[in-house]
Image (cartoon, rainbow, N blue to C red):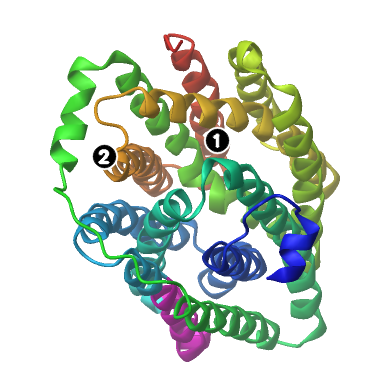
Amino acid sequence: MLKFKKLYDGIDVTKDLVLLLSIGGLYSLSISLSNTFVNVYLWKQSQSFTDLAIFNLAIVILQPLTFILAGRWAKKIDRVIVLRIGVITLALFFIAVLYFGEKSSHYLVVLGALLGIGYGFYWLAFNVLTFEITEPETRDFFNGFMGALSSSGGLIGPITAGFIITRFESNIGYSVIFGISLALFATAVITSFFLRRRPSNGRYLFPRIYQERKSNANWRYVTNAHFLQGTREGIFVFVISVYIFITTENELSLGTYGLVHAGTAFIIYTLATKLIKKEKRKKAMIIGGTILFAAIFLIIFKPTFPLLLTYGVIIGIAYPLMLVPYSSMTLDVIGKSWKAGEMRIEYIVVKELFLNAGRIFSIIVFIAAIKIYNPSIVIPILLVIFGLGHFLASLLLLKLKVE
């Protein structure tokens, strides 16, 4: 603790702040090690896009439902307990994957449900604790340090996992990676016991904040934009990783893609947070959304590994341009909405509900389309259609009127 205070002179770096950073860092490293490879692991077992879609559908259905429940619990019981439930559930996911082994593709709904529940509890509690543990004078430090930890995980995790997986025969490498992720989450659970208890009170008015969309045009635009954002994220999260594996048949290539993408995004995020001023937000967002859509045409006709790497670099540039102003404008709208301070949990829950509704919609359409049509023909078409998500979201947010 003293070392932190000496390094960041003038900033009151509390014990709880360091502990929350530690938990966030362990989460980021664990997820970056294994998240991309879970879809490939399941693909290798079933060779079915339908199965992958069902797995991801279970995640995005359970995640918003859990957010609603976690929001209620965050106002009724200790926030730290809600965080701990999330981390424990994520640890249970890796225990289940290790236990099921090469039969994991037979338990897609169970595995997806565990991830969705874990994400829901973890992120609701982490967002609330971040607000409560940090002060205005320490918030920039926390966000900057957390961003550095997340970026470091994104740089180190995929390439390390890809290297380990390719060093072992059969699927032993996957078991090693999932085991490491389990150990990291177990460490996060232990760390959470050192956080100061944070009991809470207050009424949970989730339906009222949902209804706020009727009288608050800005809030309606933001929630609709998150639905559009979700339509892209729903299928891209698993299709691209499988494309890379099908093209190269090598997990190290997938790790290389993750390294290139994360490295580019890290540089652009660093620049974007400094250079995108308030008056330039909408312009940057439109540019980012346009590039995200245009990049799809690199990979829909005949994806090769060099083209996929180029795609990773381009979206590594585009995502920060889109998401930095997009996130800031979202927070501005929430901050100026009805009882924002008292109802911050409810606003987060409603926002996540629309984001995941978009994901659910695109995955359901994906499943129906590949059942009816030839997947090799219809998947590129779906990538183009749902690839418009961020671009349409940026157009919609041009209507925002935030002082």
Q: Which residues are magenta?
A: 87-105
The residue tagged 1 is 383
* Residue 286, picture quadrant: top right
Please tell me which residue lies in front, 47 or 59.
Answer: 59
* Residue drawn at 43 percent across, 46 percent down: 370
Tell me: 258 left or right of 229: right
Badge nearest the viewer, 1 or 2: 2
Q: Residue at x 37, y 62 (%)?
A: 116
Residue farthest to the front? 10
**Magenta-drawn stretch contains 59:** no
Q: How many other residues sit within 10 Å of disc 1, few (<14), some (14-19) or many (≥20)?
A: many
The spot of residue 127 in percent (x, y) is 44, 51
Question: Where residue 280 sits: x, y (%)?
Answer: 65, 13
The residue sitting at 50% across, 42% down in the picture is 233
Relative depth, front residue between 385 and 112:
112
Along the viewing direction, whichever of 194 and 267 lies nearer the viewer: 194
User: Where residue 13 appears, x then y in whole percent?
Assistant: 62, 59
In the picture as drawn, the residue positioned furthest to the right comes out as 306
What residue is shown at x 46% (from left), y 84% (from top)? 103
Question: Is residue 248 in view from this perspective?
Answer: no
Q: Which residue is mark 2?
A: 342
Could you tell me which quadrant the N terminus lies in?
bottom right
Label 2: which secondary element: loop
**Type of residue at label 1?**
Leu
Assess disc 2: are there few (<14), some (14-19) or many (≥20) residues with their C-alpha within 10 Å of its C-alpha.
Answer: few
Note whether 42 is above or below 150 in the view shown.
below
Q: Mark 1 and mark 2: span between their CA atoms? A: 40 Å
